[in-house]
Image (tube, coloured by chain):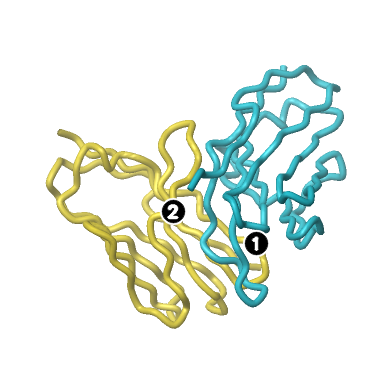
Chain colours: A cyan, B yellow
Amino acid sequence: KAGVTQTPRYLIKTRGQQVTLSCSPISGHRSVSWYQQTPGQGLQFLFEYFSETQRNKGNFPGRFSGRQFSNSRSEMNVSTLELGDSALYLCASSSLTGGVTDTQYFGPGTRLTVL
Amino acid sequence: KQEVTQIPAALSVPEGENLVLNCSFTDSAIYNLQWFRQDPGKGLTSLLLIQSSQREQTSGRLNASLDKSSGRSTLYIAASQPGDSATYLCAVGAGNTPLVFGKGTRLSVIA
């Protein structure tokens, strides 16, 4: 069974630009979560999608948005990039049992550098 | 608000030593607790998942325990090897809310 894939793996942007990251979950998983990881803040939850609906949202500004498609693939978008958005963005997929998230499986991440 | 703390932040041990990593959480109303491993610049690999009704889980040389009432979990690694060098993160799940992660313990196993 293929794991979680994320594209692109590395990205360099300049301040003010926007970026779109993509995540393909494990086949059969309908829940996709996004996290931002920085050395100072650690792993912080961005949002979770299940069946094309946002199920949970973290405490990030509106410049961060996401969506999920009918095939469970997900994208996140960051507009008006700031230097502080430089981070490793991780996607995780899981199945849900009774509305509860099961084990999360993480992709390799997208390393975003904002210059 | 759930807070997860991992102590120590970094640990260096000689090869072959048994070691314990600690994780504490402030709200005992959890659904499960998960331990992950992260290699530098890579994603997270799930190691063990403990449901709130369980006391421990084992996988190979790894054993994770959970004491919900005291808000603590430990990850025991037996006979450590240089390949165990990585950052270990614990994360607490409350069911239908996002996982809350600790900041991790960076482990170095010296040959």
- Disc 1 versus disc 2: distance between alpha carbons? 16 Å
Tell me: residue A15, above or below residue B17: above
Of mark 1 and mark 2, the one earlier in the sequence is 2
Q: Residue at x 22, y 37 (%)?
A: B82
Name the quadrant containing residue A61. Answer: top right
Residue in front for this viewpoint, B9 or A91? A91
Amino acid on which the number 1 mark rests in the picture = Pro
Element type at mark 1: loop
Residue A97: percent from the left, percent from the top?
60, 73
- Label of residue B30 in the image: none
Name the quadrant containing residue A90. Answer: top right
Residue B46: percent from the left, percent from the top?
44, 53
Residue in front for this viewpoint, B108 or B57? B57
State how many labels appear.
2
- Label of residue B46 in the image: 2
Q: Residue at x 54, y 57 (%)?
A: A104
Tell me: residue A19, above or below residue A29: above
Q: Quadrant of the C terminus of chain A?
A: top right
Residue in front for this viewpoint, A93 or A40? A93
Q: Chain of mark 1?
A: B
Residue A18: percent from the left, percent from the top?
83, 26
Left or right: residue A32 versus residue B105 is: right
Kindly identify which residue carries mark 1.
Answer: B98
Q: Residue at x 25, y 38 (%)?
A: B83
Left or right: residue B102 versus residue B97 is: left
Mark 2 residue crowding within 10 angstroms, few (<14) / some (14–19) / many (20+): some
